[in-house]
Structure formats: C-alpha cells, structure tokens
Amino acid sequence: MAGVLRLSVVRFLPGVVKPAAVPAVQQKCNISGKSVRTGQNIVRPPPYPYKTKRYGFFQAIFDHTRKRFDDNTKIVVVEGPIASGKSKFAKELAQELDMHYIPEATMDDYYINFYGHDLRKLDEKLPLSCQSFDEKKFLETPKHLNTAGFQINMYAMRFWQYVNALEHVLNTGQGVVLDRCCYSDMVFVEAMAKNDYISKGARSVYYDVRENTIQELMKPHLVVYLDVSVEKTKENIKKRAISHEVKSPALTDQYLRDIESFYKQNYLKDISTHAELLVYDWNEGGETEVVVEDIERIDFDRFGKHDPKMKDWRHPLEWDWNNIRMKYSVQKHIFYALFNVPRTDVPELLVNPEDSKQWADVLEEAPGRKYYPGFNPDQGDKVLWKL
C-alpha cells in the first residue's frame, strides 16, 4: 500500500499555510465513492445533451445548471512524473467516484482531424519549419527548432481539454477526473528552459500565452499527486519499453529531477492555494480504494466566501451558473483569440512568408480541410442545408 502524506500540504510543502478551522455547524460537501453513492441511491437529473444541442440564453431560461449538481460535481486532476502510473490510477479513480475520465492530452489531438486523417503524413510536402513535431520527435531531438512551438501547442491542447471538462461538468453535473491538465504544463516548460531545450525568449512567449488564457478557467477542486523518485521513474521508463523513451536524449537525470522539483516547489504550492491537495508516495504503487477513503474525508465546503480556496466555484445566483455554463459551451470560441499573442522577437517561433504560403496550400488540399467539419461531401457528409 502506498504511503500517504495526508491532506495537509504543510507537511509536504514548506511555507504553505494550513486553512483555519471552520465552525462545525457549517454543512459539509464531501465527494463520495461508488459504494456510498449506491447505498444512498443518488439519482441525478438526465444530462443536458450539450454535444448535440446548443445551450444558449433561451435554453438557460428553462434549464438551470445547479439542478444537476451533487457532492461529486467536481474536477479532480491526477498529476505525477513520467511513467508514474497516473493514467491507470486516474481511470480507476474515475470509476470509483462515478466520474468521467479524460485521458492526458497528446499531439494526436492536434494533428488528427475531425475525419480521422493524420496531418503528420503531409510532412514530406512541407518545409522544416512547418513540419509536425510531437512527443516522439521531442524525445528523439529535444533541442530541435520546433520544440518551443510543440510545447506551446501542448499547452493549447491541455487548455481546450480543460474547457471540455468544464463543459461536461456544467452540463451534466457529473464530475471529471483529468490525467494531467493545463495548470501543470508550466512544469515541463521550466524543465525545458533549464536544460536549454527552449530559449528564454520562447519561455517568455509561453507565459504571455498562458497568462492571457488560463485566467478564463475555473481551477480544479482537488489535485492528487503521485510522488515517484527519479530512480523509480527511470526504472518505470525502462520497464514499459517504449523505444523513443528508453533511448531518449531528453530524459536525462537532470531533466527528470527538474520536472520533480518544479512540480513540488512551483506547481503544487501554487495550485494548493485554491484546490485541495493529496500527495502519495507511489514508488511501489498503491491502492485506489485508500485514496478514495481519503478523498471522502475532505470537506470541500468548509471555506468562507472570502477564502481563495474553491473561490471559482462559489456563485450565489443561479443565473451566474447559467452564464458560466454558456461561456464554456456556446461562447467558448472566443478563447481562440486569446492565443493570438503578437510576439515577433523569438525566431524559433516564426515562419517566413514563403514557408507559410506553402503550408497553407498543402493544408488546403488535405482530406477534410476544404470546408468546415460536417460540410465536406468528399468525406461522406450528407450536406443539403445546414444553419
């Protein structure tokens, strides 16, 4: 069974103040596991079909948001170093908590289009500056010209995945368990910059993009961090035997130590000012049921209205919740503009006009790119008239 560093962040991260005690009369709001929920016979109203039906102002008048909420209407994020076993654990945790599991974002989300076509196959037609660059290529050539652009794209994929998680929670009332998220993406940027995989200028652009976008999100309720030593991480990488990981010049001892350090000294300290934090010694794995028991003991509703903890999730009026729900549903397209940060001082993030024109021409001829998704007859779309 894994060792647990308990609920208090104070024992793990120096300098973080433990919240003051809350009067016992305050009602608790605890996440409950599957066995408890089955015994309570909890029935949630049917989920709103947000993937097929618009949720706008008119719908908000008749379909209020909080009617689907219960104690498990929360966002939980599982974090940990590479090969820590967090994906397996996150799936099990979602199942135990009756929550929706969202796997870790990858560059497949970026390159595989709506119709399943992999745009990485176009590389032979493209100049170097416009060719694909994903996790495998980074691990093989970490100091490549395209590494900085890759990590900014990874942040974007994690950002949109988190928006989708919020949309799911607000439209269905079902909680979500995420395998890593956009808030911890900075850990990898800092480690890359320290190991000279990206330049100081690229790091600066990354933070401009991050600060311009991440403020639009609602922070998670709970972060579970699986603590695995560098030595055990290396052993796990070797054991799972993925060739480009085992032979990677990127995954040096120093890079792995830096990831661990930035996780513990930066990310966990920062996120713990809003979210609850559980940290476990996961060098030998652990039991999901034990974690569930610890989660069930957390009173997420013990904080006052001026406390920064859970602040994003305290809104007194029903219409406030409806507006937030619309923001992450029908209005989420406005976030695209926030990624447009005008920086022309970092050469590795720039593409010259000739390369850009070649990229646009090749992309225009790619399968499923002629029209907006759903309007391409050559891809099997039955298009008569759509509004």
Image: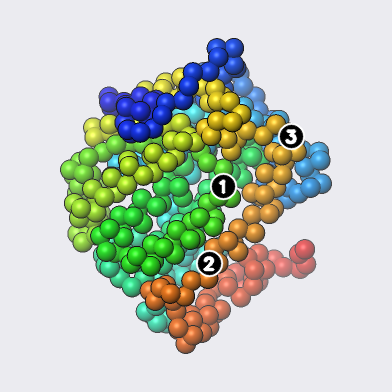
Q: Nearer the viewer, residue 7 or 297?
A: 7
Q: Quadrant of residue 368?
A: bottom right
Query: Which quadrant is home to the C terminus?
Result: bottom right
Q: Quadrant of residue 212?
A: bottom right
Q: Dot 3: few (<14), some (14–19), or many (≥20) neighbours within 10 Å?
A: few
Please name the amino acid that badge 1 sits on: Leu
Residue 38 seen in render: no
Q: Which element is circle 2 on?
A: loop
Q: Which element is circle 1 on?
A: loop
Please name the amino acid that badge 3 sits on: Glu
Q: Nearer the viewer, residue 367 or 142?
A: 142
Residue 183 on image: x %, y %:
45, 47
348 lies left or right of 215: left
Extreme residue toward the top, this view: 25
Residue 73 on image: x %, y %:
58, 32
Residue at point 45%, 83% (across, down): 352
Please name the amino acid that badge 2 sits on: Val
Q: Earlier in the sequence, mark 3 or mark 2?
A: 3
200 lies left or right of 302: left
Query: Which quadrant is home to the N terminus?
Result: top left
Residue at point 50%, 55% (across, down): 211
Q: Pointer 3: what residue?
A: 318
Asked if disc 3 and disc 2 are in contact, CB closer than 8 Å, the reply is no
Residue 357 on image: x %, y %:
51, 84
Q: Nearer the viewer, residue 39 or 106?
A: 106
Whether 337 is drawn above or below 100: the answer is: below
CA distance separating discs 3 and 1: 19 Å
Q: Which mark is residue 7?
A: none
Q: Pointer 2: what residue?
A: 341
Q: Earlier in the sequence, mark 3 or mark 1?
A: 1
Q: Pointer 1: what residue?
A: 217
Q: Which of the two marks, 1 or 2, is nearer to us in this view?
A: 2
